[in-house]
Image: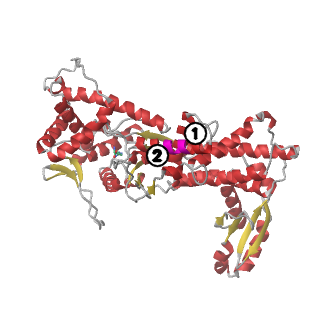
Amino acid sequence: MNLYKYVSEQINEKLGMPVNLESPRNREFGDFATNVAMVMAKQVGKNPRDLANELVGKLTELDFVADANVAGPGFINIKLRDDFIWQNTTAPKQMDNATPQTIDLDYGAYNVAKSLHIGHLRTSIVGDTFNRISKFLGHKTFSWNHIGDWGKPMGLIIAWIERLHPELPYFRDNFDSNTPVNFEINPNELNTYYPAASALAKQDPEFQARAQEIKAKFQDGHPGYFALYEKFLSVSLNAMNNTVRRLNILPFDYDLGERNAAKYLDDVEEILRDKNMIYESDGAEVINVKRDTDNAPMPPYMWRDSRGADTYDSTDLAAVYCRKKTDNPDKIIYFTDLRQSLHFEQLFRAADMSGIFPYDRFEHIGYGTINGADGKPFKTRDGNAAGLDDILDMANDAVQERVKESGKELDDETIKTIALAAVKFNDLLHDVRSDYVFDPSAITSFEGRTGPYILYTAVRLNSILNKVQSSKIKVQNEYKMNTDERNLLIQIMDFERTIVSAFENRATDMIANYAYDLAQLINTFYHNCPIMRDDVDDETKLGRLHIVRVARDTLATTIDLMGLKVPSEM
Ligand code: ARG
């Protein structure tokens, strides 16, 4: 049951007005509180305390209310009946949705022949969790891995390989695609090509020009460049799949990026020309996306660069066109670095002005950067910008260290699972839009607001449940709860509201914080409420086992929504 929703609907109906309900953390005075009497007093011409007393009389008539009383200048505290809580606490289930939305989610969006950088971590984690929540709430989602497989880097990489192996037949204009070529790409080497080529292009205008020429010909379908591209593309896609697996994120519904979008450029161009939206500027073709009301500068959207090549801008607009045709979504939501905000603002305007997709059905969730202790973007020990693998490796080492210190023995798989949970949980814990500091030691602690703490709590509950036959756990109709048990059940009944708000506010941090609060209440219960001890009577044992089970199921669902896995031991 969604406790908050139920209680507030019942109260609104009973009092005949919308009531602002709060659920205080400290439940000493009540499970819910409201200032409705103070808000309404003027309107109905009464003093707030008198009105509060009147309303309390009505509230106590509700069958789930144990007690209601007035505090201070007119606050109302409401205490729920224990039997109501006991009988209505159930484990969460995937919801039916009467008004499901179709949502296209654009996250991941890795690049061909570039190893994943730290920024890809956040888009993957937050995007994946948002996808899981949406599905849980019964929405229909399509995840698009909008791969960077078409733009400038392709030209640079082909030009680089040309420099390394000029003898290869790919570079001939009369290349025949049936020609077998004895050339293999080494995945590790491939990752060095792009940085090397882009560094050279900055110093050497001739190489730069060559790369641009190649890019334009490649996009025009040069058979040799294409055959070479297919080769490194497949190496890259393979590496991406490994990452998706390593991160334990759901497989993408579409691994279709810029190159796929480019197929729709002609259709889109026709629309834009029809509406006279494309004009020439410094040899490039651009779209004006300014509005009269703009205060900040709004540069034009680049349709085609001065060499006539497709751009990041044009393929993004074409991708919208493609998604509209394929999924016809109610919403398209992008998860990228905040620094791309201007690009998306331009894209949304261009799509809206051309009638391809309405502005108000787009969203860009821009995330902040992951920093080191110095407050600057995180670097590895050797001073290089950290890659995604570096981050995971560092977390792995930190977990290994802790496990060694504690004298535990855990296998490699378990250590990896814990390290991944540490990284993902810490990421989700922070407001998406803010920067955070990555500290491998802090995030791998087994105590506090960390992934390992959450997993440890789940392992603990599992180990209790593993010792009892599940058929032996029956729910009694009545059970006399103590405060720790009661607080835990109320938190469990807050699960649904949390997920709904996380979805509505696009705030995945709510889930991580919920998991932490839940884990804390579970651990308090665990310490204060013995279960299997000889002096515990059967009724109490049965009641507590039921609590353990719903708590475990709720925590497990929360953990799953964050894309973490629970190890069998810790
Ligand atoms: N590939 C880009 C990058 O790594 C992100 C693409 C985001 N999605 C999009 N539709 N533009 O920065």
Q: Chief secondary structure of the magenta span?
A: helix
Q: Secondary structure at mark 1?
A: loop
Query: Is residue 400 shown left or right of residue 303?
Result: right
Query: Is residue 302 shown left or right of residue 63?
Result: left
Q: Is mark 1 within 8 Å of ligand 1?
A: no
Circle nearer the viewer, 2 or 1 = 1
Seen from the viewer's position, the closer of residues 30 and 95 is: 30
Seen from the viewer's position, the closer of residues 204 and 550 is: 204
The magenta stretch spans which residues? 395-401
Report x, y in % for residue 135.
54, 42
- The part of the image, by quadrant, that contains residue 521 is bottom right
Residue 44 in view, yes or no: yes
Q: How is the image coloured?
A: secondary structure
Q: Which mark is residue 565?
A: 1
Report x, y in % for residue 356.
33, 47
User: Residue at 66% of width from left, 56% of height from top?
Assistant: 5
Residue 252, placed above or below residue 375: above
- Crowding around mark 2 (Cα neighbors within 10 Å: few <14, some 14 to 19, many 20+) is many
- Crowding around mark 1 (Cα neighbors within 10 Å: few <14, some 14 to 19, many 20+) is some
Residue 431, placed above or below residue 325: below
Of label 2 and label 1, which has the lower sequence position? 2
Residue 438, placed above or below residue 546: below
Q: Which residue is mark 2?
A: 127
> What residue type is disc 2 on?
Gly
